[in-house]
């Protein structure tokens, strides 16, 4: 584990693009998953459900942590905003984790069609992380417990490092904010290390989150008050993300800034769930979706015959 070179940075960035594309494809498409022909209204799912807004940030954190901790078998990741399931599902599929429990989710063209078509589909995948997701044992939907779970996983396991992604809206729950006090209990050498990452994408559904409204100084002081050292990360700067993970910081608390809905047709409060409401019937929305999907240049990252090109 060390700061990485240009090849690794490029690989991380490609992985983010890859999973961003698949997040969008899962939410919207029931056919034409590789855009082999012009996108048509028939390619769009009849009922659009899912959460796009948080997905890019989830993919950024996942790709960066995956690269940095790739040689550490005791590393784990806890995702607070489980509603960002399209992103989680994309990553689990890409790593072959989904195929271990679902024979149809092979890491090839047929598995790609499968996860996209059956996301948020009758008898298919739900729109949130759920017990059929590898590594998940409870039906989710309730924000707040991720940090406590991360500490629980480290309790009595000094070999473990668990990163936890906490939504800025999630941190407004009493459970999430109070869980940061667990840091004060983890003083001995018998426990593992928790790496909290606050996903500061600015919004909680339709309004700015309280933490996004705080001045940087206020947020830093709050974090220090819990015994952590704040380290801000620009989510668009992979080099800096890797550098941050490599810095010797005493009890780091990473604050990862992204723009909610980044990469999509609209941002912030409009991006929380499905940012285009009617691409099935609206010509302009259909074209907007097609341009959005094309912006990821997925054909450079996946080939029908050769599979994943990362
Ligand atoms: C305890 C609880 N309260 C409210 C909700 C409803 N809810 C679903 S997503 C969401 C916003 C979450 O915001 P954030 O954690 O910042 O995630 P992101 O903006 O990245 O989607 C809320 C309030 C919930 N799921 N659980």
Image: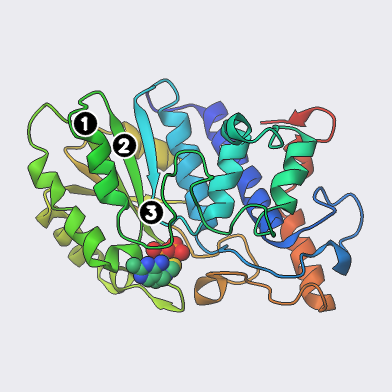
Residue 239 image-quadrant placement: top left
The residue at 23%/61% (across/down) is 175
Name of the residue lying farthest toward the front: 123
Residue 80 in the figure: left or right of residue 111: left
Q: Is residue 287 visible?
A: yes
Q: Is residue 246 above or below residue 37?
A: above
Looking at marks 2 and 1 on the same chain, the residue that comes earlier in the sequence is marked by 2
Q: Quadrant of the C terminus?
A: top right
Query: Regarding mark 1 in the picture, which secondary structure is present there?
Result: loop
Does mark 3 have its CB less than 8 Å from ligand 1? yes
Which residue occupies the foreground of this view, 9 or 74?
74
How far, Cα to Cα, is label 3 from label 2? Answer: 13 Å
The residue at 52%/70% (across/down) is 272
How far, Cα to Cα, is label 2 from label 1? Answer: 8 Å
Name of the residue lying farthest toward the right: 37
Which residue occupies the foreground of this view, 86 or 221?
86
Q: In x, y percent, where is residue 137?
A: 42, 44
The residue at 62%/38% (across/down) is 93
Looking at marks 3 and 1 on the same chain, the residue that comes earlier in the sequence is marked by 3
Q: Quadrant of the N terminus?
A: top left
Q: Which residue is mark 1?
A: 192
Q: Are marks 2 and 1 in contact (CB under 8 Å)?
A: yes
How far, Cα to Cα, is label 3 from label 1? Answer: 19 Å
Which residue occupies the foreground of this view, 102 or 238?
102
Residue 61 image-quadrant placement: top left
Q: Is residue 236 visible?
A: no
Q: Which residue is mark 2?
A: 162
Residue 12 image-quadrant placement: top right
Q: Estimate how packed mark 3 is, as few (under 14), some (14 to 19) or many (20 or more) residues with alpha carbons within 10 Å.
A: many
Q: In x, y percent, where is residue 189?
A: 11, 27
Q: Which residue is mark 3?
A: 80
Q: Is residue 44 above or below residue 299?
A: below
């Amino acid at each position: 584990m060390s700061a990485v070179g240009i090849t690794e940075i490029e690989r991380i960035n490609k992985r983010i693009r890859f999973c961003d594309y698949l997040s969008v494809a899962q939410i919207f498409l029931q056919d034409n998953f590789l855009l082999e022909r012009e996108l048509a209204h028939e390619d769009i799912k009849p009922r659009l459900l899912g959460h796009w807004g948080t997905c890019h940030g989830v993919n950024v954190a996942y790709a960066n942590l995956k690269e940095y901790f790739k040689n550490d078998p005791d590393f784990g990741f806890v995702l607070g905003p489980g509603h960002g399931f399209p992103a989680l599902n994309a990553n689990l599929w890409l790593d072959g984790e989904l195929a271990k429990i679902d024979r149809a989710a092979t890491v090839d063209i047929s598995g790609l069609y499968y996860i996209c078509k059956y996301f948020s589909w009758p008898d298919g995948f739900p729109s949130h992380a759920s017990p059929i997701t590898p590594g998940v044992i409870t039906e989710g939907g309730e924000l707040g417990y991720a940090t406590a779970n991360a500490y629980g996983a480290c309790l009595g396991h000094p070999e473990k490092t668990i990163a936890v992604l906490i939504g800025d809206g999630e941190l407004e729950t009493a459970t999430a904010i109070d869980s940061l006090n667990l840091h004060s209990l983890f003083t001995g050498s018998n426990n593992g290390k928790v790496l909290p990452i606050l996903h500061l994408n600015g919004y909680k559904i339709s309004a700015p989150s309280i933490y996004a409204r705080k001045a940087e100084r206020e947020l830093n002081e709050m974090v220090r008050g819990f015994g952590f050292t704040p380290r801000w990360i620009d989510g668009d700067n992979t080099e800096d993300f890797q550098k941050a993970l490599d810095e010797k910081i005493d009890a780091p608390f990473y604050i990862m800034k992204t723009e909610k809905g980044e990469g999509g047709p609209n941002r912030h409060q409009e991006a929380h769930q499905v940012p285009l409401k009617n691409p099935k019937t609206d010509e302009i929305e259909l074209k907007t979706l097609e341009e959005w999907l094309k912006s990821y240049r997925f054909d450079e990252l996946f080939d029908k015959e050769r599979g994943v090109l990362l």
